[in-house]
Amino acid sequence: MTEVSRRNSDIYGEQQPEQDLRAHRVRVKAAGLSVCVLAILSIGWVTLAHTSQSTAQYKTSTVELRNIPQTIEASGVVSVQTGYQVKIGSQVSGRISHLYATVGQQVHAGQVIADLDLPEMGAQLQQAEANLSTAETRLLQQHSAAMLQFAQDRDAVSQARQDAMSSREQLAQSRIIAKVQPIQTAAALSQATAAVKSAKAKLGVLTGTQNAQIAAARAAVAKAQAADENAQADYKRDEALLSRGYIAPTVSDAAKAAALSADADLATARQQLASISISLPLQIKSAQQDLITAREALTAERALARRDAMLPMTVAQQRDAYNKALNQVQLTKSETVQNSMKLQDVAAARQAVQLAKAQVQYYEDLKSKDRIVTPISGTVLQLASQQGETVAAGLSAPTLVVVADLRRLQVDAYVDETDIGKVSPGQPVEITVDSFPDHPFAGHVIRIAPSSTLQQNVVTYDVVCSFDKLPPHIRPDMTATIAIDTGVHQGAYTVPVSAIHWGARGAYILAASGHSIHRIAVTTGSTVNGRTEIAGKVDANTVVVTAGYNRGDSGINERASSTGSLPGPLKQGQ
């Protein structure tokens, strides 16, 4: 026991320890109660401070009703309009002697781009012209000879007929006078009868062979016509193949020459048929006339038989003169038939001239292709060959120069199949070229391709857009982006872009109500000026969290709500 304890023990006696114990217990209880109160106050203050701090760090906005323009975006490329870019080539082989164009040069329609050196073509053209001159000279000679012979034969036939008429008259007179010469008259009568039989026989021969000769000539015409039709069909087929680039021009030209030759053969066969058709009736008519003449002579002889008694010798002489006249008529007629053969020679010479002209025209056409001109006005984009190089024309013409009219540009954009139903010609378009991203250009839709294009397993459609005012420095093959204006959605619910969140089930927003956060699934639409169109269980003035929220903050009650769908023609955002 210490000195203090002894002293207290002396003062208070034996009750001092019990009083100290009671006081100690009171102090312990009071200290414990104070500690509990302080702990409760501390927890409440910390919770209140944390809650205030968490609520204070959120950034919010409200759902607003706005008019949202509806647009469809697609990427594409600047291209030249159809018909305003051409690849100029050569249809013949040769060396480029002069090249008058450079890349970037402005050219006009019909301007000479290059000259080709074609020495062999010039020699072939000269040979064809010489052949034409020879054929024309021969035609002139054949025609002159035929006309001269025709005139001579015509005069000879006329004179022979006049002589025959005169002899017949004299014979008639002699027979009238020679009635007393019955013996000679009987002989003359016999001759006249024989002449009638001969004329009948000759007429029968001509009539019998007429159909056979005409049939043979018609068969020749049919054969020539069949050959001509085959040649024309071959030429048309080669022309079609040539227009598609499947054959060389020389093949089509050869078919053309064969068609012309077949035309000439057909014309010759028809001329021969016409000649036979003309000459045979003439011969038959002549034989008929001879028969008539013989019968007339027979009649005259019968009349003279009664008068030959007086002048038998005169009748015989007149009869001989008359027979000679008849023979002369037959001779001149046979020469006329030979003249028809000369007319056939003239027809053949004329066909040879036509064929020679076709050859000259063919080589002139080839020779004219030594100058290569541009069919359109525009800018030279590419030179595939240089001066001094040799170009070889094959099944397809080799490209020498590419010319395009840069005033005729358009944008070919590829729109997804889910959006193509909203696009129609005439809709306004905003065009942005990657080379000038800060300068959008106005345009409109002019055409939508009827067939689709598969790009990276996505079905798209080519939408052609034109510039309302073509800007300078735009070039083909530049990458472009278009935004097609398809209309305006009136009174759409919108929130800031930062209020949209994405999860495994799609887009959602966080709606704040008091100290609670509600997750609401939404469908997104177009975004304009930093605000995105949404649809879901929201209304105007709904408070949404845009920043500062971390899932799991204490004091926040987060619960989910079902989704909604966009009204009208809106699409779901990505």
Image (cartoon, helix red, strand yellow):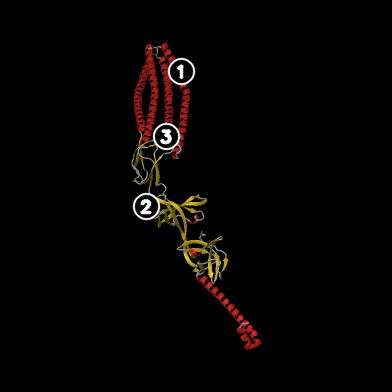
Depth check, front residue: 540 or 173: 540
Mark 3 lies on residue = 250
Residue type for callout 1: Lys
C-alpha separation, residue under disc 2 versus residue under disc 3: 43 Å
| Mark seen at residue 197 | 1
Q: How crowded is mark 1: few (under 14 residues within 10 Å), some or many (20 or more)?
A: some
Q: How far apart are marks 1 and 3 (CA)?
A: 64 Å
**Mark 2 crowd level (few <14, some 14–19, many ≥20, 10 Å Cα):** few
Measuring from the top left, give residue 371's x and y in whole percent. 35, 38
Mark yes or no: residue 492 visible.
no
First along the sequence among labels 1 and 2: 1
Identify the amino acid type marked 2.
His
Residue 571: x, y in percent?
51, 59
Closer to the camera, 534 or 6? 6
- Residue 356, image x and y in percent? 37, 30
Question: Which of the 4 image quarters holds residue 325?
Answer: top left
> Can you say which quadrant of the picture contains the N terminus?
bottom right
Camera-side mark, 1 or 3: 3
Q: Where is residue 369 in the image (x, y as percent from the top left)?
A: 37, 37
Task: For residue 74, say whether it is visible.
Answer: yes
Residue under numbered circle 2: 473
Q: Nearer the viewer, mark 1 or mark 2?
A: 2
Could you classify mark 3 by the number of other residues whose Cα lies within 10 Å: few (under 14), some (14-19), or many (20 or more)?
A: some
Identify the secondary structure beneath mark 2.
loop
**Does the residue at mark 1 contact the one at mark 2 (Cβ under 8 Å)?**
no
- Total tally of numbered discs in the picture: 3
